[in-house]
Amino acid sequence: MNFIILGLSGCGKSTQAALLAKDLDLTHISSGRLFRHELEKNTPLGISAFKNYWGKGKWVPTPIAFKLLKPELETALGHGFVLEGWPRTTGQAKLLDVFLSDKSQKIRLVFYLDTPDAIALDRLRVRAENDKAVTGKVRADDSSLAIIQSRFNAYKETISPIIKYYEERGILSRVDNSQSTEAVNRLILGRVAESI
């Protein structure tokens, strides 16, 4: 089984993806974590992607993003995965569908974590405070309100067509993400059970 979790920056995609992956014994794939890891390793890909795109709150272009994601997806295919933070455009969604179809795979459900801006901003603030307390530093993409606002704007510009794309395929599941982490997880698991 393969799933996608989409939502605004700071909405808790990683948390919900990790919980779902653990509950169903699937691989958790995070596009953001992959890019942060590349930056930490100081790879040319990581440095370029940060300086030119995600460090400015912009989406990383499809060829670069898919180059990083493809090996992770290929490794997870036989086992199943929860992909979070990608696709960001309908073009990426179609690319993912073709990639999976070529391997006789598909996405079972796409969970859209519907989150008010104020809740996402508050969660980002808490994440930044926790990161600073634990590691002494804040994630680069959480470092300023301008970057966060740019990410919010980019997300809002691209999410509607993606939602429509997955709705038309009958696999979109909207989730009221203003609830507790546990309540959202229970809701997601219930919808997975209904889809089987």
Image (tube, rainbow, N blue to C red):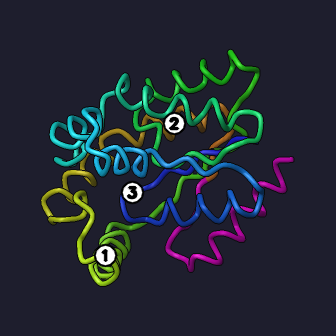
**Residue 78 image-quadrant placement:** top right
Residue 141 spot, x, y in % from top left: 24, 57
**Residue 160 image-quadrant placement:** top left
Outermost residue toward the bottom in this view:
133
Query: Which of 39/159 is in front?
Result: 39
Q: Secondary structure at mark 1?
A: helix
* Dot 1 or dot 2, earlier in sequence: 1
Q: Residues within 10 Å of mark 3 (few under 14, many from 20)?
A: many
Using the image, determine if residue 131 lies above or below residue 164: below
Real-space Cα separation, disc 1 to disc 3, in angstroms: 24 Å
Q: Nearer the viewer, mark 2 or mark 3?
A: 3
Which residue type carries mark 1?
Thr
Residue drawn at 19 percent across, 51 percent down: 150
Residue 103 spot, x, y in % from top left: 71, 20
| Quadrant of the frame with the N terminus | top right
Question: Disc 2 designates what residue?
Answer: 164
* Residue span colored magenta: 174-196
Q: Nearer the viewer, mark 1 or mark 2?
A: 1
Outermost residue toward the right in this view:
196
* Dot 2 or dot 3, earlier in sequence: 3
Query: Could you tell me if the residues under marks 2 and 3 are in contact, i.e. CB atoms within 8 Å?
Result: no
Q: Secondary structure at mark 2?
A: helix
Query: Which of 60/46 is in front?
Result: 46
Which residue type carries mark 3?
Leu
Query: Which of 136/90 is in front?
Result: 136
Question: Disc 3 designates what residue?
Answer: 8
Query: Which of 170/135 is in front?
Result: 135
Q: Main secondary structure of the magenta part?
A: helix
Q: Which mark is residue 135?
A: 1
